[in-house]
């Protein structure tokens, strides 16, 4: 297959066009929006450094989602075709997925998306006991090893719990592990003082309560199980007292298309639903939220950390890893009763949250280095680049309001 070569600031053939030369090169592979969004949390740690040049690629650019192409185009950076990226040299790769990494030779930092690598479900039938080596997690040898070697130089973990799990399921990768905490949580926490700003941006009146309805993807998710979830929420909750925001997993948007999502939710939108864009905006919505209605997806866990009340749409039908945010919510959060009025359930969920001290519990399970992720990650990246770390302090940036909320 013929590959069109893209002129770039890291290519030797194009150096005579360069204004800044002798820079370190960083490649950011983006196979899907979820990985890309998390990697965008890292890039501000490299801002204002004229010694560094960042380019992007899609490791699945011959078989990719249209949504990934649109996401990369919107960033405004140089996007190398995958064939070109594989043949180029880089000083550092920042990855949010293992896809394509076996074809790259540069030192690589792997960071999790969606609340960490060690949170996933058992792969065995319910009720069947397993050993740690049989757990289906993002920390297993199937993900971290290739041909007898660790795929990456640095594996970012969000919690000490994950380091213990890694020692059980893939001890060969333990030397590569760095417990850095959760930069997504830190940015969400930094956004909470600006709650009124986000509420104003979403058009929320002072006397309204914000309800965020969220769903991960798959037929087992909230939206997969209950196609009428958003219609029922907007119909049951009076518009003068509630503002309903929808945060759907990017995979739902990518697979079914933005047009289809808007079409499926057309009636709910007519009755007051605000759709949050798939790439960013979910944290702004959580910062504005009074209540969260959701499944075991990571957005529900992050929402619980803000202090919003939680109403789970259903009990997960697969076992959850003990000690994870999803498992804690499954244990402590009330369930949505479809045959009961919704508003009193939201009020009761708020009272249950206060009794269980759920926000503190979930924050502690999401990260064991709260507020430190930016410092640890920047130090790690500059060590891998073999560059002195900048003298200025690491700022934890509040998240921006989405440039255009889809109505």
Image (tube, rainbow, N blue to C red):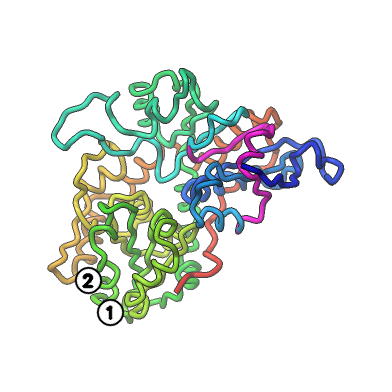
Residue visible at 71% across and 47% down in the picture: 6
In the foreground, 291 or 307: 291
Q: Secondary structure at mark 1?
A: loop
Identity of the residue furthest to the right in this view: 16
User: Is 110 left or right of 316, judged from the image as shown?
Assistant: right
Q: Position of residue 333 (x, y in %)?
A: 22, 53
Within 10 Å of the Cα at label 1, are there few (<14), some (14-19), or many (20+) other Cα atoms? some
Q: Quadrant of the C terminus?
A: bottom left
Residue carrying label 2? 343
Q: Are marks 2 and 1 in contact (CB under 8 Å)?
A: yes
Q: Quadrant of the N terminus?
A: top right
In the foreground, 230 or 88: 88
Marks 2 and 1, how far apart at CA? 9 Å
Q: Position of residue 197 (x, y in %)?
A: 50, 68
Q: Position of residue 139 (x, y in %)?
A: 39, 30
Residue visible at 33% across and 46% down in the picture: 362
Residue bounds of the magenta highlight: 74-97
Residue carrying label 1? 238
């Amino acid at each position: 297959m013929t590959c069109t070569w893209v002129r770039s600031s890291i290519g030797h053939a194009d150096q005579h066009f360069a204004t800044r030369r002798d820079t370190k090169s960083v490649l950011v592979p983006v196979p899907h929006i979820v990985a890309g969004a998390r990697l965008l949390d890292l890039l501000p740690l490299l801002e204002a450094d004229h010694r560094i040049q960042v380019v992007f690629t899609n490791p699945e650019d011959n078989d990719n989602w249209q949504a990934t192409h649109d996401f990369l185009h919107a960033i405004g950076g140089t996007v190398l075709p995958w064939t070109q990226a594989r043949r180029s040299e880089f000083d550092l790769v920042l990855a949010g997925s293992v896809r394509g990494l076996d074809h790259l030779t540069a030192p690589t930092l792997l960071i999790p998306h969606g609340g960490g690598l060690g949170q996933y479900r058992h792969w065995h039938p319910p009720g069947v006991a397993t050993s740690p080596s049989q757990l289906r997690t993002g920390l297993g040898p199937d993900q971290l090893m290739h041909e007898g070697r660790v795929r990456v130089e640095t594996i970012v973990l969000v919690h000490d719990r994950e380091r213990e799990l890694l020692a059980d399921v893939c001890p060969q990768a333990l030397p590569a592990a760095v417990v850095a905490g959760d930069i997504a949580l830190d940015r969400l926490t930094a956004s909470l003082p600006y709650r009124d700003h986000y509420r104003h941006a979403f058009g929320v009146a002072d006397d309204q309560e914000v309800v965020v309805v969220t769903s991960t993807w798959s037929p087992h998710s909230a939206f997969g199980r209950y196609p009428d979830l958003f219609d029922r929420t907007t119909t049951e909750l009076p518009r003068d007292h509630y503002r309903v925001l929808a945060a759907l997993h990017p995979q739902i948007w990518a697979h079914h298309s933005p047009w289809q999502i808007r079409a499926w939710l057309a009636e709910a939108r007519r009755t007051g639903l605000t759709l949050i864009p798939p790439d960013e905006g979910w944290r702004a919505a959580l910062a504005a939220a009074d209540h969260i209605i959701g499944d075991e997806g990571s957005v529900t866990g992050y929402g619980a950390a803000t202090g919003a009340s939680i109403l789970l749409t259903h009990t997960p039908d697969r076992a959850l890893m003990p000690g994870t945010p999803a498992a804690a919510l499954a244990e402590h959060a009330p369930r949505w009763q479809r045959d009961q009025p919704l508003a009193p359930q939201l009020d009761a969920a708020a009272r249950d949250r206060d009794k269980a001290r759920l926000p503190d519990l979930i924050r502690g399970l999401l990260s064991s280095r709260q507020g430190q992720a930016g410092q640890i990650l920047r130090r790690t990246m500059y060590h891998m680049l073999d560059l002195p770390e900048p003298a200025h302090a690491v700022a934890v940036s509040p998240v921006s309001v989405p440039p255009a909320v889809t109505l």
